[in-house]
Amino acid sequence: MKLVCKKLSEDCWELILNRLAIDDFNSLQSPSLVCKQFLSITDRLRQKLEASNRSFDSNNCEGLFRALQRFTNLREIELYDPIFGDKADVNYPIRRIASSGLDLQCLSLRRLQRPPFPKTFKKLGSTMNNLKILRCCYLKVFRNHHLVAIADALPWLEELDIQLSGFRSYYQRGSDSRSAKYIVTDVGIEVISRKLPRLRKINITGQLGCSDRSLIALSSNCELLNEIRCCYCNVSEHCICFILRRSQNLISFEAGRYYSLPDDSFTFENYMNFAQSLRGIIDYTATKGADPSTDMNAFFLFIKDPIHVHDTKTQSSDKVC
């Protein structure tokens, strides 16, 4: 008796392939090569592409370029960790991405030996008008002029992450005043705070050249800002209180160790008088039915996720944590 196998419907195949995409969007690469039907389905499903380090060799980018042509609904691309040292040309694949016709919303550049040239960012900005999120994390070299080039090319950015970029180069050259030109400083942050009016989230963790000036500029010029991360920056308790008071839309703030000033009116315990829009206050009041200021210990435990401030041992003995 001859068995007749019925074909699975496209909806059924989409459910199957979608299960693959849950864990890793890159797992859709192989099914997309099976047939035109699978290509059509995976093109609809795949929205993120993680490019391997081989993509940075100008003679070995064909895999990346084929993926750009094959998956036309990509919204996020991550390029990371080239293995070609200082000879790696990160500009080449980014220019190809800029010319791909994709409607990208997020681009991540991680652990690169060097950042793209300013003209490469300009090319990106000329074609990617919906690119709202840019992450340049753990780049070996990153300076003020790179930061300004990003702001000039992508003035509509809503999220910028430059955590620990330039950090390694700074220490390799020696952490002294002569190394300041190799890192991001307050000057660079002040410039982008004026050029990125739509900025909502920023991560400057590990930018040792950034101090209170950077946070004050961001708070004063970026009115929509709702998330700040500034661990390992040179910030004071006074400035933290200023940010909590000034930033009306702030819902998340993470700082590292800070230093205190001899001004009793600006202490972290008193930030409750200033942080009127922090989501933790609203949530605490709604959940506990109590005023947060009546039990600061309970309140600090309640908001430990949206607000992170890491005290030194001495500070912790004097402050609610």
Image: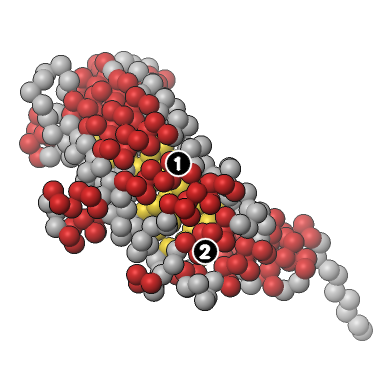
Q: Nearer the viewer, mark 1 or mark 2?
A: 1
Whole-percent x and y of residue 84?
39, 74
SS for callout 1: helix
Amino acid type at image mark 2: Pro
Amino acid type at image mark 1: Asp
Q: Residue furthest bottom?
A: 1
Residue bearing the label numbered 1: 152
Whole-percent x and y of residue 14?
72, 59
Residue name at image x 26 percent, y 16 percent: 273
Whole-percent x and y of residue 213?
24, 31
Q: Is residue 251 visible in this depiction of the protein? A: no
Q: Quadrant of the C terminus?
A: top left
In the rendered image, which quarter is residue 271 located in?
Answer: top left
Q: How many marks?
A: 2
Residue bearing the label numbered 2: 93
In the rendered image, which quarter is residue 32 located in?
Answer: bottom right
Residue name at image x 56 percent, y 65 percent: 26
Q: Please name whichever residue, 138 or 221, is drawn nearer the observer in this view of the structure.
A: 221
| 303 left or right of 225 in image | left
Residue name at image x 52 percent, y 64 percent: 93
SS for callout 2: helix
Residue name at image x 18 percent, y 53 percent: 179
Whole-percent x and y of residue 317?
9, 33
* Residue count near mark 1 (Cα–Cα under 10 Å), binned few <14, some 14–19, many ≥20: some
Q: Residue furthest right?
A: 1
* Residue count near mark 2 (Cα–Cα under 10 Å), binned few <14, some 14–19, many ≥20: many
Q: In this rendering, is residue 83 above or below 16?
A: below
| 8 left or right of 113 in image | right
Q: Residue furthest front?
A: 119
Q: Quadrant of the N terminus?
A: bottom right
| 319 left or right of 53 in image | left
